[in-house]
């Protein structure tokens, strides 16, 4: 709520009264953005659900062509990176500059490892002719249904990968700013809000892993 | 009662010397984070699209004067109605009241210095410009002929027009709408003046909140749907192609999950504006404040559950059709509540027929017709008879043009003195309001008849027995065109020549009137304090007030 | 100093829980439970998502407004899923009872 006075601290933007109002506005804004993201991915999850219910056997068969070991390792990496991110927010709140910088860098690094493994997987899929299109090869029944599975696989993991890449750049920027003490002298809202985003990206993957790699038992 | 204590209100008929318009440099406009200036940037942008889309409509109306397709080919006609639909919906109606009037008025109404995220607000305008540029590029390369709905498999496989670039333009402006919605929601939650509790908020704020909810939760689904459609068209692989085991109906589900709620983006803010106008020009407290506020939210939520009524004649399951039909009928309840409450507000009020009020009254009548014919369309059996006929065209124009555009014009007239500090010529305003109302009815009422008699939409030629209706419709469109052109002329005239309005020409309550016109950069000289409910009008207080002659 | 974040122990415990659930979902992927494979996998995913949201994203201990914002996306997702799937799951329930076709004259109601 407005109290009618303009706070004089340099961290408060002119439209806000105080740092607390600014912080809670940023948090709410990010949560609303995440709700948007839920629906953004939701369209793809809905398409997946519809086609999996129409073609369950083919989806299970196609899922067996994914690299479950790499997918599982990637899940563990993202979960671990989320833990580091949560610790980074705590470090920012405790104004521990050095720890904050290292934790942000470590989180971003795990994101890079995730992307490297994902890239390796994509390469493998390409070599095995699993990319939909004229290149696609399928030696089991229902070729076009398997193609739908792989189209969704690439669309959903691809959209997720774009979010990871954006997250890596955000984290690196924050690490740089944190190095100059931006978040340990006044407020740390940007770290908090970026953390929410990173955790959300993690949650999306938590659902993608069983749906893509473990559809039907192996 | 809103206390105006210690707030410097200048005397009547003066332009505030230092205001948000004082800096005239181009740079100050392009880099502004002032919500008022961003609102005006949006206004200038959407007017351009309104004109382009109107030209498309005019060409169609001229073509339809005769039963033969003699002015344009059927391909060109397809492109005309697609351009008209795409531009009017995504580049004019969706941003119209929220991004123009909402941006300008919302922070003023809640006593804030700006929206919560001013830089994001400016970014949303730039995103809008980028999307507009892409859409115009698509238009100049030859346009699109899919209809605004981009239905698959036509759009993905068979259309020979610039589908992907137009879809990309719509995709991009979607993000500007998401940012605006997010910004408004946070602003309403976090930036209200002291004492301004939720149930003291002006009803326009409630309607903007409901609209923002839809923008935030529906738009992403449109974005992903258009992305899927475009990729499918580009690479020939995807999930909507029935030849490859895909289901084109899924496209319709995803598309209408956005586009039906989007219909409410295109009416809820109008309802909010009308609530402001009716109370002010009836000099009465609003009847059933809580009901109007909550019905906005109810419409926003229910609006997400009725999209299947656009798909009654697709191969959607008949059971799903029944569910969607029942849910669609439910939307009539909150809509009805609003209409009854506006009417009850006017009852025994001291009504001033000033220009904004004329628009508001027009809105109530046209919206009621549009809403009631919506019930015809929600009924499964009737819908089968009139699907894809002019009945549907008439119905949604009554809501979107008769409703939203009328409310937008009303709101623009009402807040024009606040925006520019000057009054428009009242007599011309009344004339424009009248021309709009008459022209609109003459344009679209015959289309109800044609549709009910079975004339399908989207054809450039038609059987000769429908010519008389089409000629009436085209004649009406000409009058409607004059009704929209007049304000354009006298508004521009009034910027320099209009009489100075003073801070509160309408003697309205509401915080936006408690500050000079045009408002200073940060809106209020001193943050206002709110001590009571809104709309504390009383006819006794201003017996000799004649707002209509202002 | 009063913090809004939790102690590191909470985060590490959450991490351990997440890893255990990951192992569980991975392991169950190799067991044939019929259609229950999907149910179990989704139940585990939801639990993991809840752990992340509650502890890492500090939903636990934050305002009711944030709870509302966090659940809104999920509620709207449910609306989208349930009303779309009610089409797909009931589409074949109603079959034509007769193969009799109308002649064009009957169809247009010609005298």
Image (tube, coloured by chain):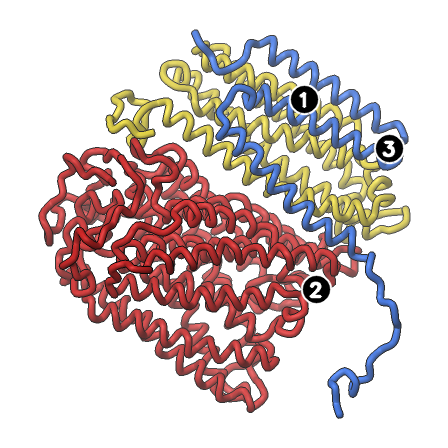
Q: Is residue B222 in sight in this rendering?
A: no
Which residue was labeled with disc 2?
B314
- The residue singled out by tag 3 in the image is A217
Question: Is B175 located above or below residue B191 in the figure?
Answer: below
Tell which tag, 3 or 1, sits nearer the viewer: 3
Chain C colour is blue
- Using the image as rendered, state which of residue C90 and residue B71 is in the foreground: C90
Which chain is rendered yellow in the image? Answer: A
Find disc 1 in the rendering and name its residue: A77
Relative side of C82 to A174, left or right: right
| Chain containing the residue with disc 2 | B
Give me the C-alpha separation between circle 3 and circle 2.
36 Å
Front-lying residue, B171 or A110: B171
Q: Are marks 3 and 2 in contact (CB under 8 Å)?
A: no
Q: Position of residue C67 (x, y in %)?
A: 54, 29
Q: CA distance from mark 3 to mark 1?
A: 23 Å
Q: CA distance from mark 2 to mark 1?
A: 45 Å
Letter of the chain in red: B
Q: Quadrant of the N terminus of chain B?
A: top left
Q: Nearer the viewer, residue B355 or B176?
A: B355
Residue in view at x 62 percent, y 73 percent: B386
For the point 51% across and 81% down, which residue is it?
B72
Relative vertical location of residue B312 with respect to residue A92 in this rendering, above or below: below
Which element type, helix, strand or loop, lies under badge 1? helix
- Graded by Cα atoms within 10 Å as few (under 14), some (14 to 19) or many (20 or more), the crowding at tag 2 reads some
Residue B318 appears in which quarter of the rendering? bottom right
Say what secondary structure mark 2 lies in: loop
- Asked whether the beta carbons under mark 3 and mark 1 sit within 8 Å of each other, the answer is no
Q: Which mark is residue A170?
A: none
Residue B469 falls left or right of residue B491: right
Mark 3 nearby-residue class (10 Å; few <14, some 14–19, many ≥20): many
């Amino acid at each position: 709520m407005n109290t009618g006075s303009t706070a004089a601290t340099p961290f408060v933007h002119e439209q806000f009264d105080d740092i607390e109002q600014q912080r809670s506005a940023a948090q709410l804004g990010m949560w609303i953005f995440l709700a948007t993201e839920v629906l953004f991915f939701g369209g793809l999850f809905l398409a997946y659900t519809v086609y999996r219910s129409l073609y369950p056997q083919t989806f299970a068969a196609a899922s067996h062509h994914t690299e479950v070991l790499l997918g599982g390792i990637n899940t563990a990496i993202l979960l671990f990176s989320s833990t580091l991110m949560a610790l980074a927010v705590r470090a920012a709140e405790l104004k521990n500059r050095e720890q904050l910088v290292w934790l942000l860098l470590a989180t971003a690094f795990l994101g890079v490892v995730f992307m490297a493994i994902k890239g390796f997987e994509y390469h493998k899929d390409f070599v095995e002719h699993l990319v939909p299109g004229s290149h696609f090869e399928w030696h089991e029944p229902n070729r076009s249904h398997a193609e739908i599975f792989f189209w969704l696989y690439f669309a959903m993991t691809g959209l997720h990968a774009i979010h990871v890449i954006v997250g890596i750049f955000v984290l690196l920027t924050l690490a740089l700013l944190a190095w100059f003490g931006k978040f340990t002298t006044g407020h740390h809202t940007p770290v908090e809000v970026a953390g929410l985003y990173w955790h959300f990206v993690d949650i999306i993957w938590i659902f993608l892993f069983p749906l893509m790699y473990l559809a039907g038992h192996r | 009662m809103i206390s105006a204590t210690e707030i410097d209100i200048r005397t009547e008929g003066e332009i505030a010397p230092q205001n948000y318009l004082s800096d005239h440099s181009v740079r100050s406009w392009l880099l502004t984070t002032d919500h008022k200036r961003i609102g005006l940037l949006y206004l200038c942008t959407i007017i351009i699209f309104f004109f382009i889309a109107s030209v498309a409509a005019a060409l169609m109306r001229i073509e339809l004067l005769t039963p033969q397709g003699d002015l344009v080919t059927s391909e060109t006609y397809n492109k005309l109605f697609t351009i008209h639909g795409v531009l009017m919906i995504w580049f004019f109606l969706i941003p119209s009241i929220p991004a123009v009037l909402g941006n300008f008025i919302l922070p003023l109404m809640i006593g804030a210095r700006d929206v919560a995220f001013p830089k994001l607000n400016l970014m949303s305008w730039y995103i809008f410009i980028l999307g507009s540029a892409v859409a115009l590029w698509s238009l100049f390369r030859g346009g699109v002929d899919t209809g605004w709905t981009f239905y698959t498999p036509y759009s993905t496989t068979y259309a020979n027009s610039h589908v992907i670039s137009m879809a990309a333009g719509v995709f991009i402006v979607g993000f500007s709408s998401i940012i605006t919605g997010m910004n408004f929601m946070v602003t309403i939650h976090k930036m209200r003046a002291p004492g301004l509790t939720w149930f003291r908020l002006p009803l326009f704020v409630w309607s903007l909140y409901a609209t923002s909810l839809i923008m935030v939760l529906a738009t992403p689904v449109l974005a992903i749907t258009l992305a899927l459609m475009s990729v499918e068209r580009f690479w020939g692989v995807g999930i909507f192609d029935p030849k490859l085991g895909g289901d084109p109906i899924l496209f319709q589900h995803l598309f209408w999950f956005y586009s039906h709620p989007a219909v409410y983006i295109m009416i809820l803010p109008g309802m909010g504006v009308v609530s402001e106008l009716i109370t002010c020009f009836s000099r009465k407290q609003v009847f059933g404040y809580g009901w109007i506020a909550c019905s906005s939210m109810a419409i926003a939520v229910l609006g997400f559950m009725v999209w299947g009524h656009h798909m009654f004649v697709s191969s959607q399951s008949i059971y799903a059709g029944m569910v969607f039909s029942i849910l669609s009928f439910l939307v009539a309840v909150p809509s009805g509540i609003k209409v009854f409450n506006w009417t009850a507000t006017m009852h025994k009020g001291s009504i001033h027929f000033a220009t904004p009020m004329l628009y508001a009254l027009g809105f109530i009548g046209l919206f009621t017709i549009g809403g009631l014919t919506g019930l015809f369309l929600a009924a499964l059996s009737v819908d089968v008879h009139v699907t894809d006929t002019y009945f549907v065209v008439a119905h949604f124009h009554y809501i979107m043009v008769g409703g939203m555009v009328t409310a937008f014009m009303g709101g623009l007239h009402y807040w024009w003195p606040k925006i520019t500090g000057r009054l428009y010529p009242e007599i011309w305003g009344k004339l424009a309001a009248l021309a709009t109302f008459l022209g609109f009815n003459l344009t679209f009422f015959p289309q109800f008849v044609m549709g009910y008699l079975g004339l399908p939409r989207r054809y450039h030629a038609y059987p000769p027995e429908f010519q008389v209706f089409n000629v009436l419709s085209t004649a009406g469109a000409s009058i409607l065109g004059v009704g929209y052109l007049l304000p354009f002329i006298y508004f521009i005239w009034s910027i320099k020549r209009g009489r100075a309005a003073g801070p509160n020409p309408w003697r309205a309550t509401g915080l936006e009137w408690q500050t000079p016109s045009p408002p200073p950069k940060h809106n209020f000289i001193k943050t206002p304090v709110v001590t009571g409910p809104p709309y504390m009008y009383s006819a006794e207080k201003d017996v000799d007030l004649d707002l209509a002659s202002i | 100093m009063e913090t809004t974040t939790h102690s590191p122990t909470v985060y590490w415990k959450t991490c351990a829980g997440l890893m255990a659930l990951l192992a569980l979902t991975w392991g169950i992927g190799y067991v044939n439970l019929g259609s229950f494979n999907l149910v179990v996998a989704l139940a585990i995913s939801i639990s993991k998502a809840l752990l992340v949201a509650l502890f890492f994203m500090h939903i636990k201990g934050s305002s009711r407004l944030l709870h509302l914002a966090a659940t809104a996306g999920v509620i709207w997702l449910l609306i989208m899923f349930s009303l779309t799937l009610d089409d797909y799951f009931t589409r074949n329930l109603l079959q034509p009872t007769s193969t009799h076709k109308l002649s064009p004259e009957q169809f247009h109601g010609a005298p």
